[in-house]
C-alpha cells in the first residue's frame, strides 16, 4: 500500500509539473507613440504623423499556456493636436494633454508561443483591454473658443476600453520583443479638455508600442 501511495504521489507531481511548465509570467516594458481623435483632432493620417507624441509603460501578464495571457498594463503619454492640421470649427487652438491609464488585459497568441514551441519563434497576436484613464489638459487663454464649447478643467477620469493586434518575436528562452497597434475608446469626450455641449461621443486614443519582455516559467 505504501508503494502505491508513493507511486501516485510521484505520478501526480510529474503531471502537475508538466502542466505548469507551459505557464509563464511575462514582464514587459514598452515605448511608442500616441494620438487621439476627438472634437478637434480628426483621423487625418498626415496630421497624425505630425502630431504623434511619446508614451511609455509596462505590462504584467500570466500566460496559462502557449496562447492565453491575462494581466494588467499601465501607460503614460502626451497628446497634441493643432487645429491648422484639421480645419475644423475651432480656430487657432492647440490640444496639449497628458494622460495615465491602467487596465486589465487579455492577450491571445494566434500561434503556440513559449519555451517549448521553438518552431514558432514569431507569432501575431490580438488583445483586449479595459480600465480607467486620467487626463489633464493645458488651455490657451489668448484665443476665443466657440460659444458651444464646454471645458473640463483639472484632472478628468473616464473609462477606457478597446484592443489591437501585434507581432512578437522570441530571441531566446526568456527574452521577447514585440510591436503592436492599439485603438481605445474613451467615453466622456474629455481627452482634449474641452468638448461640444451637445456632443458626448467618445474620444479615441490610438497609437503604436514597441516592447521588450522577460518571461519567467512557473515550474
Image: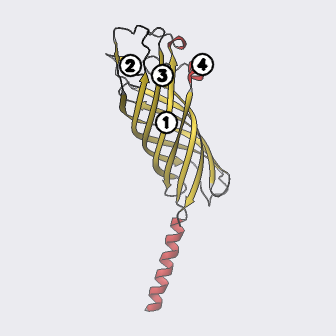
> Residue tagged by mark 3?
96
- Of tags 1 and 4, the one toward the viewer is 1
- Taking the image as shown, residue 149 lies to the left or right of residue 50, namely left
Q: Specify the farthest residue to the left.
A: 198
| Residue 149 x, y percent position in the rendering | 35, 13
Q: Secondary structure at mark 1?
A: strand
Alpha-carbon distance for marks 2 and 4? 23 Å
Dividing the image into 4 quarters, which one contains the N terminus? Answer: bottom left
- Of tags 2 and 4, the one toward the viewer is 2
Question: Relative to the observer, which residue lies in front, 15 or 181?
Answer: 181
| Residue 120 x, y percent position in the rendering | 65, 53
Q: Which mark is residue 194?
A: 2
Q: Are marks 2 and 4 in contact (CB under 8 Å)?
A: no
Alpha-carbon distance for marks 1 and 2? 20 Å
> Residue tagged by mark 1?
76
- Give the mark nearer the N terminus: 1 vs 3: 1
| Residue 77 x, y percent position in the rendering | 50, 32
- Give the mark nearer the N terminus: 3 vs 2: 3
Amino acid at each position: 500500500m505504501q508503494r502505491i501511495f508513493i507511486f501516485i504521489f510521484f505520478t501526480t507531481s510529474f503531471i502537475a509539473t508538466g502542466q505548469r511548465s507551459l505557464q509563464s509570467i511575462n514582464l514587459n516594458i514598452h515605448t511608442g507613440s500616441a494620438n487621439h481623435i476627438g472634437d478637434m483632432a480628426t483621423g487625418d493620417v498626415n496630421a497624425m504623423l505630425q502630431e504623434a507624441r511619446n508614451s511609455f509603460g509596462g505590462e504584467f501578464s500570466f500566460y496559462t499556456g502557449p496562447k492565453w495571457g491575462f494581466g494588467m498594463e499601465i501607460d503614460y503619454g502626451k497628446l497634441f493636436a493643432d487645429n491648422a492640421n484639421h480645419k475644423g470649427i475651432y480656430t487657432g487652438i492647440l490640444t496639449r494633454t497628458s494622460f495615465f491609464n491602467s487596465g486589465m488585459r487579455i492577450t491571445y497568441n494566434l500561434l503556440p508561443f513559449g519555451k517549448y514551441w521553438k518552431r514558432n519563434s514569431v507569432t501575431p497576436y490580438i488583445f483586449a483591454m479595459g480600465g480607467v484613464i486620467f487626463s489633464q489638459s493645458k488651455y490657451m487663454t489668448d484665443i476665443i473658443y466657440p460659444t458651444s464649447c464646454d471645458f473640463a478643467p483639472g484632472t478628468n477620469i473616464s473609462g477606457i476600453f478597446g484592443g489591437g493586434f501585434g507581432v512578437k518575436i522570441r530571441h531566446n528562452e526568456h527574452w521577447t520583443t514585440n510591436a503592436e497597434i492599439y485603438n481605445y475608446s474613451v467615453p466622456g469626450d474629455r481627452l482634449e479638455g474641452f468638448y461640444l455641449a451637445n456632443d458626448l461621443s467618445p474620444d479615441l486614443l490610438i497609437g503604436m508600442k514597441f516592447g521588450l519582455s522577460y518571461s519567467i516559467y512557473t515550474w
